[in-house]
Amino acid sequence: MAKELYVGSLSYETTEYDLEKLFSVSGRVTSVHLIRDTQTGRFMGCGYVRMSTDAEAKDAILSLDGAILYTKPITVSIANPQKQKNQGGYKGKKPAGAAGTGARPATRKAAPKGGKAPASSGAAPKAAPKAAPKPTSKPASKPASLGAAPKSGTKPASAKRAPRKG
């Protein structure tokens, strides 16, 4: 029998103090942990209680499973072992096609300068995908009525700044 208990169907008003007080009728509570959403910090409605002995944990399950806390019946059961989280990163495995695996990437032979591919064993040659045409027109400049600067490189009189006072 495990000492760690799962407590589910908790009201959102439940606090760690409430659970510690409730479970203390079955024995000494060593820890209480409420589960919260990692992004928002919002209480998820479940938690874990650790009792000091297996006998106290068994008594807590028998006496508190189905008990009413904040107008909701709670569930109390033995907590399942925590799953190991995948931390990511390199785990000593080589990715597919990595160096040293013997696999070589497929290469295509270039067509001769004449433009025709060499004759193959009856298979029709695949057409290469066509590249999109490059735009040749230059972006239009602003008309003079919209405040475009004259081509001589000088600024119009209205664009000059007034000298600073001070």
Image (cartoon, rainbow, N blue to C red):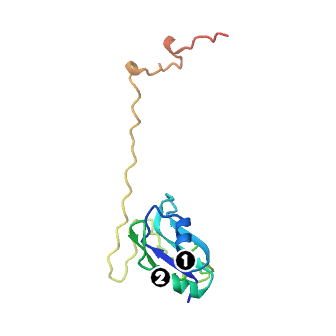
Across the whole image, how many numbered discs are drawn on residues? 2
Q: Which quadrant of the rendered structure holds the C terminus?
A: top right
**Can the viewer see residue 85 in this picture?**
no
Q: Circle 2 sits in a helix, a strand or a loop, which is it?
A: helix
The furthest residue to the front: 25
Q: Nearer the viewer, residue 159 or 108?
A: 159
Residue at position x 38%, y 18% in the image:
145
Residue denoted by label 2: 63
Residue at position x 55%, y 77% in the image:
25
Q: Quadrant of residue 10?
A: bottom left
Location of residue 30 in the rendering, given as x and y in whole percent from the top left corner: 63, 75
Q: Earlier in the sequence, mark 2 or mark 1?
A: 1
Question: Which mark, by number, is residue 4?
Answer: none
The furthest residue to the right: 166
Q: Nearer the viewer, residue 20 or 140?
A: 20
Location of residue 48 in the rendering, given as x and y in whole percent from the top left corner: 53, 74
Residue neighbourhood size for the residue with mark 1, other residues' Cα within 10 Å, grouped as few (<14), some (14–19), many (≥20): some
Location of residue 139 in the rendering, given as x and y in whole percent from the top left corner: 40, 35
Location of residue 49 in the rendering, given as x and y in whole percent from the top left corner: 55, 75
Residue at position x 37%, y 53% in the image:
132
The furthest residue to the bottom: 1
Residue at position x 64%, y 9% in the image:
165
Residue denoted by label 1: 25
**Can the viewer see residue 135 in this picture?**
yes
Q: Circle 1 sits in a helix, a strand or a loop, which is it?
A: loop
Label 2 is placed on what type of residue?
Ser
Q: Nearer the viewer, residue 92 or 103?
A: 92
Q: Are marks 2 and 1 in contact (CB under 8 Å)?
A: yes
**Alpha carbon distance from label 2 to label 1:** 9 Å
